[in-house]
Image (cartoon, coloured by chain):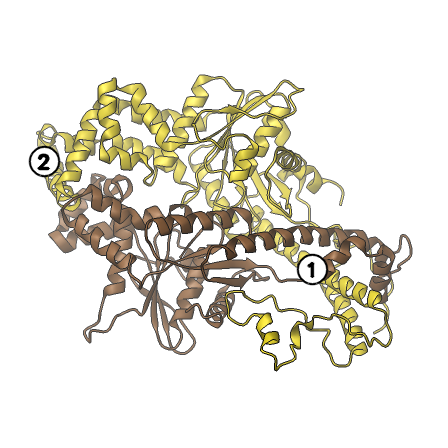
Amino acid sequence: MSRRPEPAQDQDPVREHLSPAHALEIDPLIEDPDTRIVVCCGSGGVGKTTTAAALGLRAAERGRKVVVLTIDPARRLAQSMGIDSLDNTPRRVKGIDDSAGGELHAMMLDMKRTFDEIVEAHADPERAAAILNNPFYQSLSAGFAGTQEYMAMEKLGQLRSRDEWDLIVVDTPPSRSALDFLDAPKRLGSFLDGKLIRVLLAPAKVGGRAGMKFLNVGMSVMTGALGKVLGGQLLRDVQTFVAAMDSMFGGFRTRADATYKLLQAPGTAFLVVAAPERDALREAAYFVERLAAEDMPLAGLVLNRVHGSGAGRLSAERALAAAENLEESRIVDQPDGKAGLRNSPDTYGSSESPARNVTDGGSPATEDVDGAAPEDEPTATDGERSVERLTAGLLRLHAERMQLLARERRTRDRFTALHPEVAMTEVAALPGDVHDLAGLRDIGERLAAGHAELSGAS
Amino acid sequence: MSGKGGTGKTTVAAALALALAEEGKRTLLVEVEGRQGIAQLFETQALPYEERKIAVAPGGGEVFALAIDPELALLDYLQMFYKLGSAGRALRKLGAIDFATTIAPGVRDVLLTGKACEAVRRKDRGGRFVYDYVVMDAPPTGRITRFLNVNDEVAGLAKIGPIHNQAQAVMRVLKSPETAVHLVTLLEEMPVQETADGIAELRAARLPVGRVIVNMVRPQVLDAADLELVGSVSRSAVARSLSSTGLGGARRGGHAERLVEPLLAQAEEYAERYALETEQRAVLAELDVPLHELPLLAEGMDLAGLYALARKLRGQGVS
């Protein structure tokens, strides 16, 4: 194998940079006094909650009075912000840099508590008690599909109307579809004060006019059918519940509508959070389209967990070739060929553990010796041997990294091709999880720097 | 099959369905969340609400798929028990179906699990089960117990009536030894934590916990001995080694020498992740559940990858 000249340094930039037109600038967004609500949405497992918390912290340390509404934070993240107790009210987060005059508050949504509070606020104590004790209410509020989304938006409305904070950062619930939180409030709202409920209450009251006849027939069939399907007891529970809630009906619809309007208002900014993976970005694309269809103001896309490399000019192919080269020379040195085999991270679930091979006695466990250099090294010392092994490993690690980079870039580019109008910031991947303020601050830095890093000189 | 969002539970569910279908068996893969993830995985068009063959497994087995639409399932159900014909359409117009499937406590979940259980128990004319296995791509770990146990809840709420009976029947299937709830996780803190919580909840509800499948496990590139060396190795020795394979000069400022720091930095990140993964493996090992691992597919997920994962599952004796 002949030595090549020094590799060319001028080609292969680490990654193709986003053009400045695509850059999402976080700081101007969160510093702008007109920005009052930032909604972080996206599919599950892309770092929504962490992004929301990091944005909140950054805004607070830049002088704004911020509240972060989280839905389901990781335990240690919640602890780091002092909101591990679930009491449904914002708590001030200690330990932030308040030299700019900002404050950070955080809360974790308790949807049952939020629902109870609405009931308590809108009904006299006796009625409230009747509702709260109704079994139908109890299962509804304990979290059937849509309730969490409705309550998250309800809480957002409450926080906003108190006007105590400059900025509210909301995390959205981990729904089966990232869009649920837009639909569920409407659905629940229209259910709670819709026609259907009134029919359940008093079928006789509706109809009468000739044109309504068809509807009327449908309705009586329906009450009957629902009764059959659900069982009389449940239907009676629903009816009692509805009767008790009667005074609040207009309220639910109006509130759902008000929250919806709030989301469309100019002071609101949506951030779609995604990771550079196919599914997450596909979901993000749906979301972008949906937000546009609903006239919701999209600020941009946060692309989390993007990988980079300090040695981006060394391609995967060259790194692999070099690693093989190093390993080959070791095999030549060790004619029994043990060295090349060092790859058996198999399962623990399966019964054949490496230990068994040894204890069973008979077979000299050949594979798992793992290059532990034998004493009879003819040419190289143990030290050199292990450095070579390490170097080969480093090169393989690098090749893997470069392949990952290429894959992420392709995925990202597919998204930008579909949605060139969406501004984007990228957040470099961290090797570990975030669970303290310092970690959040670091993410905040990366969020704000994402575009600079990308559009800066390559 | 459940798992935290983003852990690849749909993929693992599909791979399991394939693995179980080998040797001439027939499996049904059921989707309940309306995301059409199965269709995407198998590179076919969106699945309608009907059972459809989507793949053939090595050895002649077949995989069928069904995307359950709760609204249609309710209409089906009404039709079956009450012969509701056009009244069903009227119901739909009025939003009653929407009401029943979205809001009414648990009805949606009963319908979804009910449909799956019906497939489990269905027999052909010869009295043989139509499907040897039914694999459900279920809601995420955070909601799985509520989803499966909702039958209990409905059974408590609706004390009599067909929904009650249906719920009872479903619970009998779900709690039987023929059912296993498998959980998919990644070697990361949150998914592992959620898996541990999920198992505790399932056990409390007396639902049968199956296996834990650790998905997207990255290959081990450096072992503990290498990692120890990362901190202490002489920079110039690594530079010389790089240089020896033709990656440039090992001298100060040479190309090989300039690669050393970034490469070691990547190794340190790897070391950090390795330590975290080791920690999470230890947490998983304490759960007292059979563990399996599936590798991260470097080229991303596609049909070939799916078959590869199915082989892995089979090789590990999951099926």
Output the chain of dot 2.
Answer: A
- The yellow chain is A
> Image quadrant of residue A96?
top right
In front: A288, or A221? A221
In front: B71, or A230? A230
Q: What is the three-letter code of the residue carrying label 2?
A: Lys
Please, is residue A22 above or below residue B67 in the view?
Answer: above
Q: Can you name the residue that lies furthest to the right here?
A: B251
Confirm whether residue A288 shows in the render: yes
Q: Where is residue A210 in the image (x, y as percent from the top left)?
A: 8, 32
Q: What is the three-letter code of the residue carrying label 1?
A: Ala
Per the rendering, the mark at residue A213 is: 2
Q: Distance between the residues labelled 1 and 2?
A: 78 Å
Please, is residue A252 above or below residue A162 in the view?
Answer: below
Please, is residue A454 above or below residue B232 in the view?
Answer: above
Q: Position of residue A222 (x, y in %)?
A: 14, 41
Q: Position of residue A312 (x, y in %)?
A: 74, 53
Query: Seen in the image, is B136 located left or right of residue A242?
Result: right
Total count of labels: 2
Per the rendering, the mark at residue B224 is: 1
Task: Please tell me which residue is depicted at 40% across the width and 37% down the height of the picture.
Answer: A181
Task: Please tell me which residue is depicted at 55% across the width and 50% down the height of the picture.
Answer: B188
Label 2 near label 1: C-beta < 8 Å?
A: no
Q: In which quarter of the image is the N terminus of chain A?
A: bottom right
* Chain B drawn colour: brown
Query: Seen in the image, is A307 located left or right of residue A148?
Result: right
